[in-house]
Image (cartoon, rainbow, N blue to C red):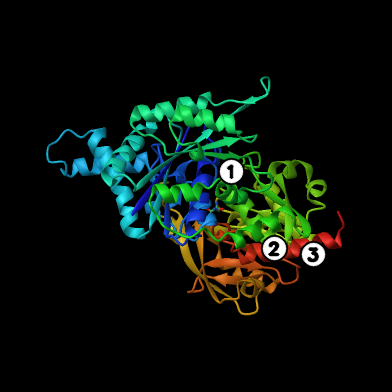
Amino acid sequence: MKYIFVTGGVVSSLGKGLTAASLGTLLENRGLKVALQKFDPYLNVDPGTMSPFQHGEVYVLDDGAETDLDLGHYERFTNVKLSRLNNLTSGQVYQTVLNNEREGKYLGKTVQVIPHVTDEIKRRIHALAAHSQADVIITEIGGTTGDIEGLPFLEAIREFALEAGVGNVAFVHVTYVPFIKAAGELKTKPTQQSVAKLREIGIAPHLIVCRCEKPLDKELRQKISLFCNVPIEAVIEEKDVDHSIYEVPLMLQRERTDELVCQLLRLDTPLPNMSHWQEIIRKLIAPQHRVRIGVVGKYIELQDAYKSVYEAIIHGGVANDCGIETVRVDAEEIEKEGGEAILQGLGGILVPGGFGERGVEGKIKAAKFARENKIPYLGLCLGMQIATIEFARHVLKLEKAHSTEFDRNTPHPVIALLDAQKEVTQLGGTMRLGAQSCQLAVGSQAGKLYGAFVVNERHRHRYEFNNHYRAQFEQAGFVFSGTSPDGKLVEVIELPAHPFYVASQFHPEFLSKPHQPHPLFRGFIAAAHQQMHRKPL
Ligand code: GLN
């Protein structure tokens, strides 16, 4: 088994996750089985309890693990299915070590960072290796070299490399080469220093991936090679992409990154076949059509809060040869402004998931606007609950209808707490989480789009449609097109009298990939495209 460790230097937000995922794409297309893993140095047990302001999106896996959004990149760029083994936080490491200590498993020893914490980290790499049976394990270490909290992880991978032996481990360091405007030059000093920092810990990177705004010329490559002690071919340019993050694998391939990694790891594999990936890029760069999609949320100013949603919209575009202009609409603005001015001219309106009351009334207005003006609407989780509340208030005339999440005393709790949630007291990891089956109604729009009767989709919620109101909704033309197999939980709703008005209690965005666009997003973008034609830009 072979191991690649991806570390980061100089600054955060370098796109280490994308680099790791792209390497995964290339190796997979060389016929290798890969597994990807993320180590996060923070003390939260998982990111599920963190605010999107802190952490961006919480990415949910089939097994219900709430994980770092980089795992979303891993699943989108490859065909791997991830589980809770693929994301490890310092919080989990310490929780395990402290539990072991309480159980007396350390036989009276003083429990220390080295070896007990580092052993636990190494155990998790071995556990993934055994579970995945992959040829190559790619482990990304979160944070930046030099952070105090990341040290145990770096120490652990240093030890791991020693134990695994030469030719079995490759260290890839992703760094930043800033362009200094005043000097008109790219500067290598921060890279030199971050590599020096790694070497202090005993890790000598084999490959230096340089994130930069401008091309790295030969002279700069020579300089980095000399100061960072790597051959010049191992200095990899990873320039800002022009159009799409999905260009990164092709960029790394041009720099022969996968070839170098395979040489280092003594893997004899054919060149990767990336023709299908190139076709995706062609559609992204030069699409036949264009659509404008509004995402109505409350974390609009954050890049990462709706990461998978934005990506799935792009994939829906690929499926329809449509370029996407995503308009990020602040739900609170709609609350104040009324929305028409903002929402007019959109091909489709999407309301993503969310928690808490802020912005909810704006989202309800957006759903009403979409329903009344026959603009395609896709609701995801909270977006389904919003569509339900809107229909209850304005079509069924159930005054002050609401979700009990936002109004405990509403006279019409059309969305209410799941039964299984009533006894829950702890916040972390206690929602209805992960993949659950959903049965689709024959002849429904959702059924047609999926081309299936039963689908498995990922969930993350505490509230659900209140069955007490089902008959009343149905009589007014609201269709429950997806339910749990026992028929009790509403999973998908739609309005047949509308060109496209579909919403799900689950999160389809987590299962969409550029090479496998999700059916609901494919259908939504197709409808949005038709809508744009009705109303020229
Ligand atoms: N807050 C809602 C619930 O808990 C919706 C959750 C979500 O959108 N992920 O049911």
Give coordinates of residue 17: x percent, y percent: 50, 45
Q: Earlier in the sequence, mark 3 or mark 1?
A: 1
Using the image, determine if residue 485 lies above or below residue 197. Answer: below
Amino acid type of the residue that numbered disc 3 sits on in the rendered structure: Gln
The residue beneath circle 2 is: 524
Could you give the CA–CA distance between mark 3 and mark 2, rounded to whole angstroms? 10 Å
* Marking on residue 530: 3
Q: Earlier in the sequence, mark 2 or mark 1?
A: 1
Q: Circle 1 — which element?
A: loop
The residue beneath circle 1 is: 304
Amino acid type of the residue that numbered disc 2 sits on in the rendered structure: Phe
Give coordinates of residue 406: x percent, y percent: 58, 48
Amino acid type of the residue that numbered disc 1 sits on in the rendered structure: Asp
Which residue is more in the foreground, 466 or 358?
A: 358
The reply, left or right, for residue 209 in relation to residue 314 is left
Could you give the CA–CA distance between mark 3 and mark 1, rounded to whole angstroms? 29 Å
Examine the rendering and report whether any part of residue 406 can be seen: no
Q: Earlier in the sequence, mark 3 or mark 2?
A: 2
Examine the rendering and report whether any part of residue 45 can be seen: yes
Bin the neighbour count of mark 3 within 10 Å (Cα to Cα): few under 14, some 14-19, many 20 and up. Answer: some
